[in-house]
């Protein structure tokens, strides 16, 4: 993967890392299923300006929309609403990396190299260090919902990979058209019309800002770039970048909110990025580094 595309992948991890804090802010103003429905309704707005044929078969768009929008984000938002902390949610959700690698091996024949597996193991050790310092929360149900969301994301990664779409802005915009109605129906059924009405009439600027962030930055930009990378590279090469999402969440909290990071946190961040480097950088880079060290 060339350096510009590596930087795009890291930009996505930064956007998504900050996103978990933004979701927590938005959940103060919206019930989770309504929040998720509004997110995708806004993310579908670019279709007003986009013209041309469907970017992928319609059944594939529906498949991705259901897996990514209804199942993954519906479960994630409800899990966080039930008590899963933002930082731990970002960590647990990245188990989708390992699910995706296994599913891609089973259904796409993508066999990760030993070097890639070693890099994943190093990054996983870093994630484990991060998780050991963070409480699980009060609800095992919430934990299970976020884990199920990770599995749904893995299947949506594979569906995106197999869509054959080349225009990723058009793809994510069409995909965003699928979740709002099912999510609104679920919100009406489980959260009730009173909660919906109260949220829409009492919205604050913080809630609106959170909604705009997750709709356009996290969805249109984030998943548009992510889908572009999945279209051009094996899933086992792209999805490991998501392991950096909890790291970017930690670092953004440290930089923007003054949250304290321990020595263990810094070591964990270093392990994750070393693991990513081992996984995604070509062998030639490591060989040049070794030769330069010998000559030095």
Image: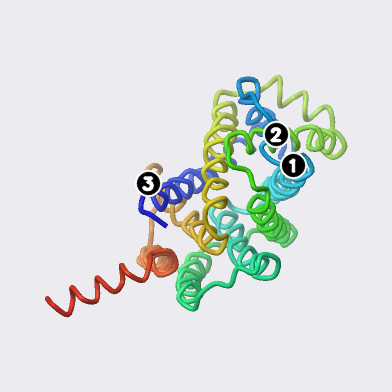
Quadrant in the rendering for residue 152:
bottom right
Q: Secondary structure at mark 2?
A: loop
> Dot 1: within a 10 Å radius of its alpha carbon, few (fewer than 14), some, or many (20 or more) residues?
few
Residue 51 horizontal/vertical position (percent): 64, 23
Which numbered marker is on residue 74?
none
Residue 125 percent coordinates (x, y): 48, 73
The x, y position of residue 206, in whole percent, is: 55, 28
Q: Is residue 84 visible?
A: yes
Answer few, some or many: residues within 10 Å of disc 2's Cα (few below 14, many 20 plus, some between 14 and 19): few
Q: Residue at x 60, y 55 (%)?
A: 89
- Judging by the rendered image, the residue that carries numbered circle 1 is 57
Relative to residue 79, is residue 253 drawn left or right? Answer: left
Could you tell me if the residues under marks 2 and 3 are in contact, i.e. CB atoms within 8 Å?
A: no
Kindly check if marks 1 and 2 are in contact, taking CB atoms under 8 A apart as contact.
yes
Q: Looking at the image, which is closer to me, 52 or 242? A: 52
C-alpha distance separating marks 1 and 3: 46 Å
Among the two numbered marks 1 and 3 on one chain, the one whose residue lies closer to the N terminus: 1
Residue 54 image label: 2
In which quadrant of the rendered image does the N terminus lie?
A: bottom left
254 left or right of 77? left
Instruction: Give how far apart the Cα atoms at labels 2 and 3 are.
Output: 45 Å
Residue at image point 40% right, 43% down? 257
The answer to which of marks 2 and 3 sits earlier in the sequence is: 2
């Amino acid at each position: 993967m060339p350096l510009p595309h590596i930087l795009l992948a890291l930009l996505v991890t930064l956007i998504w890392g900050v996103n978990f804090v933004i979701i927590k802010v938005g959940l103060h103003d919206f019930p989770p299923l309504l929040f998720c429905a509004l997110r995708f309704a806004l993310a579908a707005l670019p279709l007003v300006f986009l013209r041309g044929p469907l970017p992928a078969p319609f059944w594939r768009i529906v498949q991705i929309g259901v897996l990514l929008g209804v199942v993954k984000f519906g479960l994630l938002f409800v899990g966080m609403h039930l008590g899963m902390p933002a930082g731990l949610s970002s960590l647990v959700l990245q188990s989708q990396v390992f699910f995706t690698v296994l599913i891609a091996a089973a259904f796409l024949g993508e066999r990760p190299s030993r070097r890639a597996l070693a890099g994943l193991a190093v990054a996983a050790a870093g994630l484990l260090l991060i998780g050991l310092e963070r409480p699980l929360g009060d609800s095992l149900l919430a934990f299970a919902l976020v884990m199920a969301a990770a599995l749904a994301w893995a299947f949506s990664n594979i569906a995106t990979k197999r869509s054959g779409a080349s225009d990723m802005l058009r793809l994510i915009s069409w995909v965003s058209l699928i979740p709002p109605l099912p999510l609104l129906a679920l919100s009406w059924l489980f959260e009730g019309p009173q909660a919906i009405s109260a949220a829409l009439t009492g919205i604050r600027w913080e809630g609106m800002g959170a909604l705009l962030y997750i709709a356009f930055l996290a969805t249109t930009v984030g998943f548009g770039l992510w889908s572009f990378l999945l279209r051009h590279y094996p899933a086992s090469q792209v999805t490991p970048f998501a392991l950096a999402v909890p790291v970017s969440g930690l670092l953004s909290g440290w930089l923007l909110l003054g949250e304290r990071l321990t020595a263990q946190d810094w070591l964990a961040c270093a392990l994750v990025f070393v693991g990513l480097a081992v996984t995604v950088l070509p062998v030639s880079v490591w060989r040049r580094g070794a030769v330069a060290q010998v000559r030095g």
